[in-house]
């Protein structure tokens, strides 16, 4: 249950031409403690409860546990979330044996577009598309839990 991912800023909209799928996401946080984040997410007709642990020193790896839950229960649980609901559109772009998840944020995080790639091991090599910009792996201000408290528009 280890998540290994790298995170990058996106520097152009060219990823849209390569996207094979996109979906809307609404998420809130029941707990944003850096030691353990508890996230609630609804995407389409599915809902998930996710617990993430503290990131490794290089920001690449952390514990992640996720469970699908009933959408109506998730909608009710949003009432318990900390202030700062995140809304975004997620695009999926295939890159060799990997998939980039590109999140285009809305609301108070409008203008921020971030790409994440989940890896099998920290040393995995992948091709970087031209629309990929600066790496922000491990920079906590780009964590969704932090964007819910200190949105992009406030930077």
Image (tube, rainbow, N blue to C red):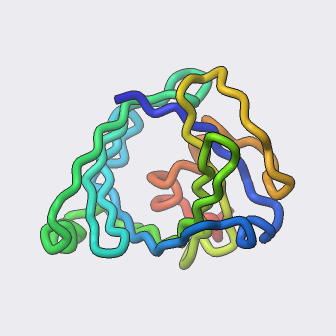
Look at 52% across and 31% down and name the residue there. Answer: 4
Look at 36% across and 67% down and name the residue there. Answer: 83
Look at 40% across and 28% down and name the residue there. Answer: 2
Toward the viewer: 125 or 140? 125
Q: Quadrant of residue 97?
A: top right
Q: Position of residue 146 (x, y in %)?
A: 50, 52
Toward the viewer: 92 or 88? 92
Left or right of 153? Residue 108 is: left
Left or right of 64? Residue 142 is: right
- Farthest residue, direction front: 96
Where the C terminus falls, by quadrant?
A: bottom right
Where the N terminus falls, by quadrant?
A: top left
Left or right of 91? Residue 87 is: left
- Farthest residue, direction bottom: 107
Q: Position of residue 141 (x, y in %)?
A: 59, 48
Look at 25% across and 53% down and name the residue there. Answer: 49
Q: Quadrant of residue 150?
A: bottom right
- Looking at the image, is 68 positioned above or below residue 12? above
Toward the viewer: 38 or 125? 125
Q: How many marks can you see?
A: 0
- Looking at the image, is 154 positioned above or below residue 125? below
- Looking at the image, is 103 positioned above or below residue 51? below
Q: Position of residue 105 (x, y in %)?
A: 58, 70
- Farthest residue, direction right: 130
Q: Quadrant of residue 11?
A: bottom right
């Amino acid at each position: 249950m280890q998540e290994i991912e790298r995170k990058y800023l996106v520097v152009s909209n060219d990823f849209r031409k390569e996207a094979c799928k996109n979906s809307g996401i609404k998420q809130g946080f029941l707990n944003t403690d850096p030691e353990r984040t508890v996230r609630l997410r609804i995407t389409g007709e599915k809902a998930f409860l996710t617990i993430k642990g503290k990131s490794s020193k290089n920001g690449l790896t952390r514990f992640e546990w996720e469970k699908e839950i009933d959408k109506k229960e998730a909608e009710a649980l949003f009432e318990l979330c900390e202030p700062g609901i995140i809304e975004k559109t997620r695009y999926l772009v295939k890159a060799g044996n990997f998939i980039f998840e590109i999140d285009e944020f809305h609301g108070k995080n409008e203008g921020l577009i971030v790409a994440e790639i989940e890896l099998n091991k920290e040393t995995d090599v992948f091709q970087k598309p031209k629309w990929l910009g600066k790496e922000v792996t491990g920079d906590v201000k780009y964590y969704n839990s932090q964007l819910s408290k200190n949105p992009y528009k406030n930077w």
